[in-house]
Image (tube, rainbow, N blue to C red):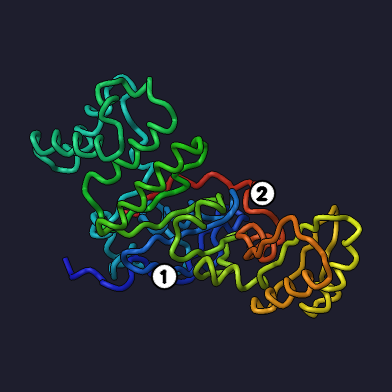
Amino acid sequence: MNKLNEDWAVEAQGLVKTFGDHRAVDGVDLKVRTGSIYGVLGPNGAGKTTTIRMLATLLKADAGSAKIFGHDVVKEPHIVRQLIGVTGQYASVDEALSATENLIIFSRLLGLGRKEAKQKAEDLLEEFGLTEAAKRPLKNFSGGMRRRLDLAASLIAQPPLIFLDEPTTGLDPRTRNQMWETIRRLVKTGSTVLLTTQYLQEADELADRIAVIDSGRVVAEGTVDELKASVGTSSLHLNIQHGKDMQGARRLVEKVLNVPSAVSAEGGKITAPLVHADHVADLLIALREANIELAEFSVQKPTLDEVFLTITGHGAEEAVREPEPRKEVSV
């Protein structure tokens, strides 16, 4: 095997996949740096899962190319499969068997010896907080426990690249936070993670860089801060103590910040775009000199919600029907 590409874990150019008349993936470009968490953010039906399946050699692209650590997914699929782990690919489990027994079976299928497979199962169950449930049949597992076991199974071969396709969908907040910590630990121990999600908070919390995908296309790409900066400036939020001071406060905000047409005032609250942060001090001084008291004051960056809405024209969790992929595996 050639030496792994040290800079890029994933390099994809112009990926296209069509199902009938539906163009599920329409020229997607991705570059994922080794050792990072890369988020692919988009609503249901945006083309995220189809893209993952093409990168993981589970679906053949109609056009475009992709490399995993420098290895072509079409020309060198067997090498690529040794370098990746994919959540969901171990869905065929025996519900009557325990977590330990299932992991041992997967390990044996991947070529591990009996003793090594048993040790690997124990280590993974401990890593994912499933030791106490190790002997319990899977049919008694909760959704969150099943999701963690699925991720554990994908790591048996300790792959340098891990595809996580919406790993926390449907999980409760506590279990979701546990999964986030596990994902962070994976990267700290040397893995690269490509994460698809429709949760804005998840992308904000985890990803070093984000590709926003909509209708099969990458419509924006960058760090969280870069994406937020692309849709506008920070905003200033003031809560005025006394209603009688609202008009005076608004006039001062418009004058000091020089944004006369972009200030909104409603219910005792004033919101205005903040182009220059150093003007905040000037505004506070002006308000104090005018004897206008504040009940609350904050400066907020644009949220990923605002980024997604601005870029795509709809919310990130707006569902779009995506056709079922055909059963097609490259060999």
Side of 138 relative to 189 (left or right): right
Instruction: Identify the residue under disc 1.
Output: 31
Q: Which part of the image, by quadrant, shows the N terminus?
A: bottom left
> Please, what secondary structure does the residue beneath circle 2 have?
loop
Q: Residue 187: x percent and y percent? A: 31, 57
Crowdedness near tag 2: few (<14), some (14–19) or many (≥20) residues, C-alpha within 10 Å: few
Identify the secondary structure beneath mark 1: strand
Cα separation between marks 1 and 2: 26 Å
Q: Position of residue 125 (x, y in %)?
A: 25, 35
Residue 318, numbered label: 2
- Location of residue 12 by image quarter: bottom left
User: In this rendering, is residue 8 above or below 23?
Assistant: below
Quadrant of the rendered image containing residue 309? bottom right
Q: Nearer the viewer, residue 250 or 22?
A: 250
Tell me which amino acid carries mark 2.
Glu
Residue at image position (25%, 22%) is 135
Left or right: 190, with 220 as reference point? left
